[in-house]
Amino acid sequence: MAKDKKKREALIYHAKPTPGKIKIVPTKPYATQRDLALAYSPGVAEPCLEIAKNIENVYKYTAKGNFVAVISNGTSVLGLGDIGPEASKPVMEGKCLLFKIFADIDGIDIELDTKDIDKFVETVKTIAPSFG
């Protein structure tokens, strides 16, 4: 009976009120037309041009410096073994949650549908510019 209760509690925890454990929220105002023009077009061009002049400016004008990817293909997840990329998602979200609450680092989980090591590594390398 206790095991069933723990299972039910865990499933409800992950499902309600909003599925999952993480979300992305804006760090800048967005209530006015001016806010949106600064956040996107035309205002967004200015930081883009500054980054193009000096790549290190990406850390000054974007979230890159505090943003990590937690990446898995689901082949070795905790003590669960090879459960696949989708089934690994709750664990990866949990790791992102731990990064946030213990180190105030923002993370996003990325599950890759490949068991090919070269493809996995290549994918990680190609998305690396998005993360600090």
Image: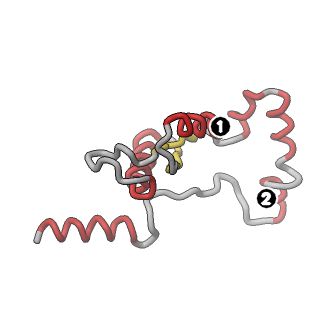
Vertically, is 77 above or below 36? above
Q: Residue 121, image x and y in percent?
A: 55, 34
Q: Which residue is mark 1?
A: 126
Q: Is residue 106 left or right of residue 126?
A: left
Please name whichever residue, 93 or 87, is drawn nearer the observer in this view of the structure. 87
Mark 2: few/some/many CA within 10 Å (<14, 14-19, 20+): few
Residue at image x 86%, y 42%? 46
Vertically, is 4 above or below 94? below
Residue type, label 1: Thr
Q: Residue 129, image x and y in percent?
A: 67, 36
Vertically, is 103 above or below 33? above
Residue at image x 83%, y 65%? 33
The mark that comes first in sequence, 2 or 1, is: 2
Q: Which mark is residue 35?
A: 2
Residue type, label 2: Asp
Q: Residue 97, image x and y in percent?
A: 43, 50
